[in-house]
Image (tube, helix red, strand yellow):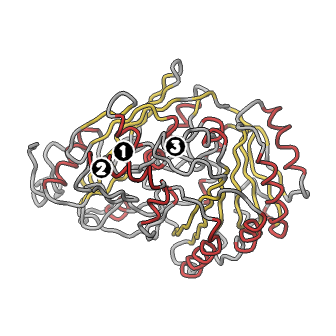
């Protein structure tokens, strides 16, 4: 394959910026004033300096950038939303194929489909789909990128009712390591389509997604319930029994840490150690009220904010608690069940961090997630009951980093024999390579290696949770 490629050192007399053939977006290098802001990603602990950032405005730009990088033997990182905790969206001394300007969303309300560009955020999708009373599973923070969350699996409030994000993916268009544009679906390159549904960014640069949509809201019964941290073990045992038979319409996320200083939380509770159960019921409001009544009545909560609210607003309610530019360090695992001895471990470690912004989050799976057969998509560990993340968080300039990184590692070690796989999107940047295999299981991982070998035999796309070709 050949293409007209300008040398990376060739510069326009007008702009002083490196040129790449017919690239029509914006090229950003270290001599430009906004280089530091454009190379920054969500996790402020990541500090990498690419040689060039190619901010694409269309698929043709992505093709041109990939071919250019291959022709000049440059490392390639792919940036969608830039929200990955491992920071794989940026690399040192290579090229960042930046899709952040490609955020278009188109909705077909009749056939319940959405077409989403690769740089879109979930807030972009919810804004367009909720105007039609539709949605698909899309995380719990609205500034999360669509591409990264989808390609890793897609855990969110709607997953127990409507499946993971990958379970709602109908097709994807991507640029391969050879600079070719392919469409992957059940009928076109089905091996690649299978791998994209959980295998991460290993196989190319996805420029657009087609999603299946569902009737959701626009008003849902949702909100958090807060209990004092001293009651965490008792509440968690009750919660375990409560969600075991909960209807698929109920999605819950448990959070251990301090009460964030959100406007809806009274000031006297700010920074108090609490256990929070966030809930979102995507059925009739009266059914949700009945379903949640036992949980809301248990041990007299400190605060109950459950009530009817717009789904899109609820999706963005946590945005200010995980701010761009703060420092993050995560350890994570799946849990097969919440046994009593495991609950004691969680309650014993969850509140011993130093930073008031560090927290533990636990996502209830099961429901529609577990009814997809293992191996039907590349997402692994579908029978786990929960996914738990141990999240050290500190702001730039604060000295909590070393202490809370050590806290996550101690906590993770204490989980020991309770660990049962892991969600690949929750893996950090310093993980043992064996943990990538752990995210999929042996049979799925080996099949992913085959697909990787077919579509990216040179491992061009390796700034990710990497699946190495043969």
Dot 3 and dot 2 residues touching (CB under 8 Å): no
Which label's residue is closer to the chain start, 1 or 3? 1
Task: Return the residue nearer the eye: 88 or 312.
Answer: 88
Q: Residues within 10 Å of mark 3 (few under 14, many from 20)?
A: many
Q: Residues within 10 Å of mark 2 (few under 14, many from 20)?
A: many
Q: On the rendered structure, is 262 left or right of 426?
A: right
Q: On the rendered structure, is 91 left or right of 5?
A: right
Badge number at residue 122: 3
| Label 1 – label 3 distance at C-alpha | 14 Å
Q: Secondary structure at mark 3?
A: helix
Tell me which residue sits at (91%, 57%) in the image. Answer: 300
Q: Secondary structure at mark 1?
A: loop
Q: On the rendered structure, is 25 left or right of 126?
A: left
The answer to whether residue 103 shows anywhere in this view is yes
Dot 1 and dot 3 residues touching (CB under 8 Å): no
Task: Return the residue nearer the eye: 162 or 344.
Answer: 344
Residue 427: percent from left, percent from top = 49, 62
Tell me which residue sits at (70%, 60%) in the image. Answer: 255
Residue 2: percent from left, percent from top = 8, 43
The residue singled out by tag 2 in the image is: 55
Which label's residue is closer to the chain start, 2 or 1? 2
Residue 465: percent from left, percent from top = 40, 59
């Amino acid at each position: 394959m050949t293409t007209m490629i300008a040398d990376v050192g060739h510069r326009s007399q007008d702009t002083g910026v490196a040129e790449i053939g017919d690239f029509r977006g914006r090229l950003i290098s270290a001599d430009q004033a906004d280089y530091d802001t454009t190379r920054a990603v969500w996790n402020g602990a990541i500090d990498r300096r690419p040689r060039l950032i190619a901010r694409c405005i269309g698929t043709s730009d992505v093709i041109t950038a990939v071919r250019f990088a291959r022709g000049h033997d440059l490392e390639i990182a792919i940036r969608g939303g830039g929200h990955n905790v491992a920071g794989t969206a940026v690399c040192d001394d290579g090229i960042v194929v930046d899709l952040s300007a490609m955020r278009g969303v188109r909705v077909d309300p009749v056939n319940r489909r959405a077409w989403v560009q690769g740089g879109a955020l979930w807030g972009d999708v919810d804004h367009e789909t909720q105007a039609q009373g539709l949605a698909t599973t899309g995380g719990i923070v609205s500034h999360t990128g669509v591409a990264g969350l989808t390609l890793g699996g897609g855990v969110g409030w709607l997953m127990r009712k409507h499946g993971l994000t990958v379970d709602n993916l109908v097709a994807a268009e991507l640029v391969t390591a050879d600079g070719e544009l392919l469409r992957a679906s059940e009928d076109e390159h089905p091996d690649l389509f299978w791998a994209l549904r959980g295998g991460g960014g290993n196989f190319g640069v996805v420029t657009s997604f087609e999603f299946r949509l569902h009737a959701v809201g626009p008003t849902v019964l949702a909100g958090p319930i807060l209990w004092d941290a001293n009651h965490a073990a008792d509440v968690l045992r009750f919660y375990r029994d409560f969600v075991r038979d909960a209807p698929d319409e109920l999605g819950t996320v448990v959070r251990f840490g301090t009460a964030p200083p959100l406007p809806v939380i009274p000031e006297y509770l700010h920074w108090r150690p609490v256990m929070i159960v966030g809930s979102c019921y995507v059925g009739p409001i009266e059914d949700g009220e009945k379903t949640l009544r036992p949980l809301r009545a248990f041990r007299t909560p400190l605060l109950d904010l459950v009530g009817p609210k717009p789904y899109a607003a609820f999706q963005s309610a946590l945005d200010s608690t995980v701010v761009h530019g703060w420092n993050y360090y995560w350890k994570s695992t799946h849990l097969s069940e919440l046994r009593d001895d495991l609950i004691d471990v969680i309650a014993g470690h969850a509140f011993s961090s130093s930073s008031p912004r560090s927290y533990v989050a636990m996502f209830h799976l099961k429901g529609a997630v577990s009814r997809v057969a293992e191996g039907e998509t590349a997402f692994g560990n579908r029978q786990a009951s929960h996914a738990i993340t141990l999240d050290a968080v500190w702001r730039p300039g604060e000295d909590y980093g070393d202490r809370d990184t050590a806290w996550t590692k101690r906590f993770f070690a204490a989980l020991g024999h309770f660990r049962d796989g892991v969600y690949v999107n929750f893996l950090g940047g310093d993980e043992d390579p064996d943990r990538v295999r752990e995210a999929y299981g042996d049979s799925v991982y080996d099949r992913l290696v085959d697909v990787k070998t077919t579509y990216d035999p040179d491992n061009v796309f390796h700034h990710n949770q990497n699946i190495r070709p043969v």
